[in-house]
Image (cartoon, rainbow, N blue to C red):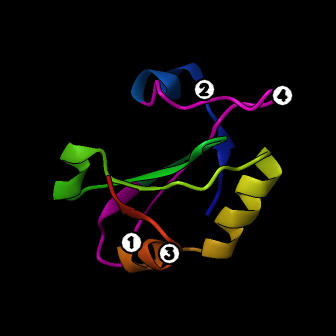
Amino acid sequence: MELREFTRHDFDAFGGAERWPDAEPLIADGAFANGMGWVLVMDRQGACLVCDDEQSAFGGYAIARPFLSPAEARAFAASLGDPKTRGEFFLAGFTPV
């Protein structure tokens, strides 16, 4: 999974994301083995996963785990590796919003 810092365009889509004092929120996107696309947003309050599924209409999935720094968020994302299914996010603690 490759994270990058938010751009202005990302804030247009995910306006509720919160900056760290010295850095922008992080975002990554990808596709599961079945072709379903996903977007992961990480900020100082936690993370939100939006997939191309019915749950996206309700805000997707979230994990209420504060990340004290971008480095901590990146370490968490690295622990997820390259997810092949939504289940890997669920095992990491993501639940429906």
Tag 1 residue: 32
Categorize mark 2 by other alpha carbons within 10 Å: few (<14), some (14-19), many (20+): few
**Proximity of marks 1 and 2: CB atoms separated by less than 8 Å:** no
Which residue in the structure is indicated by mark 4?
Answer: 22
Q: Residue at x 53, y 74 (%)?
A: 92
Residue 20: mark in rendering: none
**Distance from Cα at disc 4 to Cα at disc 1:** 32 Å
Regarding mark 4 in the picture, which secondary structure is present there? loop
Q: Which residues are magenta?
A: 14-38
Q: What's under tag 3, amino acid-wise?
A: Pro
Q: Position of residue 5 (x, y in %)?
A: 68, 37
In terms of secondary structure, where does tag 3 sit?
loop
Q: Which residue is mark 2?
A: 7
**Which sits earlier in the primary sequence, circle 3 or circle 2?**
2
Q: Which residue is mark 3?
A: 83
Residue that appears at 69% across and 65% down: 76
Residue at 53% across / 54% down in the picture?
64
